[in-house]
Amino acid sequence: MFDQSPYACRVEWGQHGAREAADRGDITIIVDVLSFSSTVVTAVSLGAVILPYPPPLNEQTQAYADQMGAELLFGRAEAARLGRPSLSPVSFGAEQAGKKLVLCSLNGAACTWIAQKVPALLIGSLLNASAVATVANRLQQETGATITVVPCGEKWDAPRDGENGLRPALEDYLGAGAILSKLDGSKSPEALVCIGAFQQAQANIAELLWECGSGRELREKGFGDDVRHIARLDVYETVPRLVGEQFVDCSQ
């Protein structure tokens, strides 16, 4: 069976990778650069209380938000029309401090929900790559658990029956590589190649993410500011960790 043992630091893709990490009881770092992870890091740094919830965005999601006494965040376009925060990280400001907000996303929130019972679930992105690695290293020393970084990837539109719907995403691979490059302990071959991709791309990472498929998609929808925001390295010390139903900053 495929695995990356006996290495201390591993990389696994998407929802199945999150499930594998959860089954092993790994310290798990969820990486969805455009945009769940970057949005959570940004929002928590501003004092917002984020509760993740898996898709779809429907009546059940609204009922969960009502149960938790939280506001359900809408999609980018609708939220922008209403002047409310959304999956767009730049839509958050100081006015969201202290507010409980339910954030649903197709990839990052879904992977978080699958892996929520791991000993430590952290949210990583380019924005907090060094900080999240520092916390993961500390947790690894305390617990002896292995670390799995999970780049979430995207979904293909309308896959045919029997096709794998996961589309590996450049931005998530580079975000995972940035984090893995700062982790202590032995690295699997998969992790080493991921690190190499980040190191090769680091000098031009903003340009690469601007022009990659996911970046172009957001730009064409009018969210170029999101792409500029998420492409910055080590802007925040914030490290969201899932505690119960919500993310708290565990950087201290």
Image (tube, helix red, strand yellow):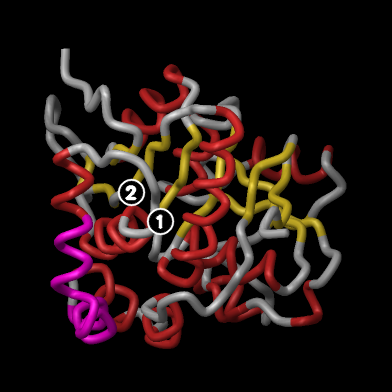
Instruction: Tell me the quarter of the image containing the C terminus.
Output: bottom right
**Distance between mark 1 and mark 2 Cα atoms:** 6 Å
Residue at 41% of width from left, 81% of height from top? Answer: 232
- Residue 108 at x, y = what percent? 45, 48
What is the x, y in percent for residue 29?
Answer: 46, 45
Residue in the image at 59% along x and 25% along y: 117
Element at label 1: loop
The crowding category of the residue bearing disc 1, from other C-alpha atoms within 10 Å (few below 14, some 14 to 19, many at least 20), is: many
Magenta segment includes 202:
yes
Q: Quadrant of the N terminus?
A: top left
Quarter of the rendering containing residue 41: bottom right
Amino acid tagged 1: Asp
Q: Taken as a whole, is the magenta stretch helix, strand or loop?
A: helix
Estimate the x, y position of residue 182 in percent, counting from the top left: 38, 58
Residue named by callout 1: 32
Q: Nearer the viewer, residue 70 or 246?
A: 246
For badge 2, the amino acid type reads: Pro
